[in-house]
C-alpha cells in the first residue's frame, strides 16, 4: 500500500510545493519508507525523492527547488513491495526521455516479463520497481503516435495487476491522467480553479470537501478545476456524481472507521488477497530448504509467535519432519550446545525490527551453518539483512499496535509454504492439492461474509461478558494457537486477563476457576479434535460455565451445548479446517476491539505497548 497525491491548478497564489508536501503527509499512514515529488515547469520535470519518513524528507526538500510558476505536481509515499526502500526505488519513475513521470500504488504482477521485453528494445531501467515499466510502456505508445490518454490506456492493457496511478508529461502541462484498478483513487475539486487527486480523501479534505470517487477500470483526465471520467474498457465518457464529504479529518484518515485496529481487521480480506500473490518460485525455495534440513525451528515473539504455532502445525502436516517452536527470546538459551549445522530457522516478524528475533537469528548464524527463512511485512527491514530467503506478506502498513491483518497474512504465507511442500513431495493427489488451493483462495470471502454480518453479535457478546474480568479461550489441536492469540488481543487492547489455553490441559488445573456463569469461549472447527472438544465443553458446562463457541455454520453438537455461538461461514471439511486459524481469528480480534471500547480504552494505543519492540 502506498499513498499518492497530486494537484493541477490555474491559481497564482498557491504554493504547489507546500500543498503537495502537506497532502502527502496526510497519507503517511499508507506507507512511510520513502517519498517523492515531481513538479512540471518550462517543459521540464523537477523531481525530488528519497528514502525515509516524510518528516525527514520534508526537511531535505527545499521548496525553492520546486519552480514557483509550476501549476502541476504529483507526490508519492511508498510502502516498498518490489525493491528496497531506497532513493532510486522511490517514486516518481520516469521514461528514457525524462518526459513522463508516474506515481503508482499497487502491484504490476507481470512486470518481470514486461521489463525483459522493454530492456531488449533498448529501454534503460534505473530502479528495481514494478512501477518503472509503466512510463516506458507509455513512452512506446506515444512513439506510435497516440495521445497521452490513449497511450496510458494502451500501456495498461499490457499490465496485469492492480494500480492507482497518476501520469504527467512535459508536453501536456495542462493535464494529469489518472487510472484506477483495485487501488483506491479519489478526485477533489475546487471548480474552475484547482483539481486534486489522492489515494484517500483526507489528503485534500482541508482544501475541498467536493470529490469524485473513482471506481475500478476508470480513467480521469484532470485539468485545473475540472475532471472528465472514462470507462477504460470502451473509452466511453462517464457521468460521475460529485460528492460532498461530511467527515472530519480524523475520521477520514481512518477511512471512516473509528480506529485503525477496526480498519485493519476489515482490511484482512484484501491483505490476504495480496499475500496469495507470493510467487511459486519463492515458496518452493522455502519448501526445498525445509525439505533438505536436518533440524527445523520456528521462532518469533507475541502475535508472530502465535502465527508460528499455527504455521508449524500446518507445515508439519505435509513435511514429514518435526518443527520445534521456540520463542525468540529463548532461542539462544535453549539451543546453546545443541544447534547443529544444516538446520533451518523460520523467523517471523511483521515489523522485521523486533530485537529478540533479530538477535536470535544473528546468534544462530554466527554459531552454525544454518539457513534463515524469514516472513515479514516490511521490505528491507533489519531482519532481512540476516536472512537467506525472505517472504514479504504484503499486508500493507499496520498502524494499530495490536497486530491483526499481519497475523492472518503470516499464517497464510506459512500455509502456502505447506501446500508447496505437499506438491514437491507428491504425497497427496492433484485433486486434493486443488481442494487446498480452493480453500485458500476462498479465505478472503469467508472473512468478508463474516465481518459483514457479525459485528452486532460480537458487540452483544462483549456486553454479555462485560461483568466478567476473567475468562478462557479454550481449544484443541491447531486452534490452540487461535485461542492464545485471542487471549493476547484481549490482554493488549482491553486490559483483561483472558487466557488462551489447551482445552484438554484445562482440566489439570485451570478448571478450578470455573463457577456458575464463568465464561469459556471454545474455538471449535470440525477437525479431528472436535469430538474430544465436545467432551471438554460438557466438563465445563457441568460446572456451571457459560459456553460461548466459535463454530462453522453447519455445526450442531457444540451449538446445542452453547449459550451463544459465533458462526464462521465456511464449509465443514478438512481443507478449510486446516486454515481455520485464519478464518476464525477476526471474530476474536473484533471481540478484543469492542471490549476495549466497552472499557473506555483506545485500542490503537494500548497501555505500555509499542508497535515495534526494539529492547530486550
Ligand atoms: C501484537 O499484537 C503485539 N503488538 C506484539 O505481540 C507483536 O506481535 C510482537 O512484539 C512481535 O512483533 P513483530 O511481529 O513485529 O516481530
Image (cartoon, rainbow, N blue to C red):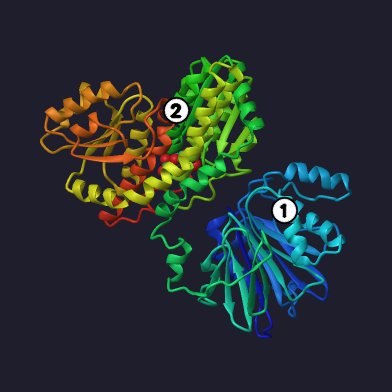
Q: Quadrant of ligand 1?
A: top left
**Are there few (<14), some (14-19), or many (20+) residues within 10 Å of tag 2?**
some
Element under label 1? helix
Q: Which mark is residue 575?
A: 2
Q: Does the CB distance between marks 1 and 2 fall below 8 Å?
A: no
Q: Position of residue 580 (x, y in %)?
A: 40, 33
Element under label 2? helix
Report if the beta carbon of the residue with label 2 is closer than 8 angstroms to ligand 1.
Answer: no
Question: What residue sits right under mark 1 in the picture?
Answer: 157
Instruction: Specify whether 339 is left or right of 161.
Output: left
Name the residue at 21% across, 28% down.
537
**Are there few (<14), some (14-19), or many (20+) residues within 10 Å of tag 1?**
few
Name the residue at 44% across, 27% down.
575
Q: Position of residue 136 (x, y in %)?
A: 80, 55
Location of residue 430 by image quarter: top right
Picture layout, residue 90 above or below residue 361: below
Amino acid at each position: 500500500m502506498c499513498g499518492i497525491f497530486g494537484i493541477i491548478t490555474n491559481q497564482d497564489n498557491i504554493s504547489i510545493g507546500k500543498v503537495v508536501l502537506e497532502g502527502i503527509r496526510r497519507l503517511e499512514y499508507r506507507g512511510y519508507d520513502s517519498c517523492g515529488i515531481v513538479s512540471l515547469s518550462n517543459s521540464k520535470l523537477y523531481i525530488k525523492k528519497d528514502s525515509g519518513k516524510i518528516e525527514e524528507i520534508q526537511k531535505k526538500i527545499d521548496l525553492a527547488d520546486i519552480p514557483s510558476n509550476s501549476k502541476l505536481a504529483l507526490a508519492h509515499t511508498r510502502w516498498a513491495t518490489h525493491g528496497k526502500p531506497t532513493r532510486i526505488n522511490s517514486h516518481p519513475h520516469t521514461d528514457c526521455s525524462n518526459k513522463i513521470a508516474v506515481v503508482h500504488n499497487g502491484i504490476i504482477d507481470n512486470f518481470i516479463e514486461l521489463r525483459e521485453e522493454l530492456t531488449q528494445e533498448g529501454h534503460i531501467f534505473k530502479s528495481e520497481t514494478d512501477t518503472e515499466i509503466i512510463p516506458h510502456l507509455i513512452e512506446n505508445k506515444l512513439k506510435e503516435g497516440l495521445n497521452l490518454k490513449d497511450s496510458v490506456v494502451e500501456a495498461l492493457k499490457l499490465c496485469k495487476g492492480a494500480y492507482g496511478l497518476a501520469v504527467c508529461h512535459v508536453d501536456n502541462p495542462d493535464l494529469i491522467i489518472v487510472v484506477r484498478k483495485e487501488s483506491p483513487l479519489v478526485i477533489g475539486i475546487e471548480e474552475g480553479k484547482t483539481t486534486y487527486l489522492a489515494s484517500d480523501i483526507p489528503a485534500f479534505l482541508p482544501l475541498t470537501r467536493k470529490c469524485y470517487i473513482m471506481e475500478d477500470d476508470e480513467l480521469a483526465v484532470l485539468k485545473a478545476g475540472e475532471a472528465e471520467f472514462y470507462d477504460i474498457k470502451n473509452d466511453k465518457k462517464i457521468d460521475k456524481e460529485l460528492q460532498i464529504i461530511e467527515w472530519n479529518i480524523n475520521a477520514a484518515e481512518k477511512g471512516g472507521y473509528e480506529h485503525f485496529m477496526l480498519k485493519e481487521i476489515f482490511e484482512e480480506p484484501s491483505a490476504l488477497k495480496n499475500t496469495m500473490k507470493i510467487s511459486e518460485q519463492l515458496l518452493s525455495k522455502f519448501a526445498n530448504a525445509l525439505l533438505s534440513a536436518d533440524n527445523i525451528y520456528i521462532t518469533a515473539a507475541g502475535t508472530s509467535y502465535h502465527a508460528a504455532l499455527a504455521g508449524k502445525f500446518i507445515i508439519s502436516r505435509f513435511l514429514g519432519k518435526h518443527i520445534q517452536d521456540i520463542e525468540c527470546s529463548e532461542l539462544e538459551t535453549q539451543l546453546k550446545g545443541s544447534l547443529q549445522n544444516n538446520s533451518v530457522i523460520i523467523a517471523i516478524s511483521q515489523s522485521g525490527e523486533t530485537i529478540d528475533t533479530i538477535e536470535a537469528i544473528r546468534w544462530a548464524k554466527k554459531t552454525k551453518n544454518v539457513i534463515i527463512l524469514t516472513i515479514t511485512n516490511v521490505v528491507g527491514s533489519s531482519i532481512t539483512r540476516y536472512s537467506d530467503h525472505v517472504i514479504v506478506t504484503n499486508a500493507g502498513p499496520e498502524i494499530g499496535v495490536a497486530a491483526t491483518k499481519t497475523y492472518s497474512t503470516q499464517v497464510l504465507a506459512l500455509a502456502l509454504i505447506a501446500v508447496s511442500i505437499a506438491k514437491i513431495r507428491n504425497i497427496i493427489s492433484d485433486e486434493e492439492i486443488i481442494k487446498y488451493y480452493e480453500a485458500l483462495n476462498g479465505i478472503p470471502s469467508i472473512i468478508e461474509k463474516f465481518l459483514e454480518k457479525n459485528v452486532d453479535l460480537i458487540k452483544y457478546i462483549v456486553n454479555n461478558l462485560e461483568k466478567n474480568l476473567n475468562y478462557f479461550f479454550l481449544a484443541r489441536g491447531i486452534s490452540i494457537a487461535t485461542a492464545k492469540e485471542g487471549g493476547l488481543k484481549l490482554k493488549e487492547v482491553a486490559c483483561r486477563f483472558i487466557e488462551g489455553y489447551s482445552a484438554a490441559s484445562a482440566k489439570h488445573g485451570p478448571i478450578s476457576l470455573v463457577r456458575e456463569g464463568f465464561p469459556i469461549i471454545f474455538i471449535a472447527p470440525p477437525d479431528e479434535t472436535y469430538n474430544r472438544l465436545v467432551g471438554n465443553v460438557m466438563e465445563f458446562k457441568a460446572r456451571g460455565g457459560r459456553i460461548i463457541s466459535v463454530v462453522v455454520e453447519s455445526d450442531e453438537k457444540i451449538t446445542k451445548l452453547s449459550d451463544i455461538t459465533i458462526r464462521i461461514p465456511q464449509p465443514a471439511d478438512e481443507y478449510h479446517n486446516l486454515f481455520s486459524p485464519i478464518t476464525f481469528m477476526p471474530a476474536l480480534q473484533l471481540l478484543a476491539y469492542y471490549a476495549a471500547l466497552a472499557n473506555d480504552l483506545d485500542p490503537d494505543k494500548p497501555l505500555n505497548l509499542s508497535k515495534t519492540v526494539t529492547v530486550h
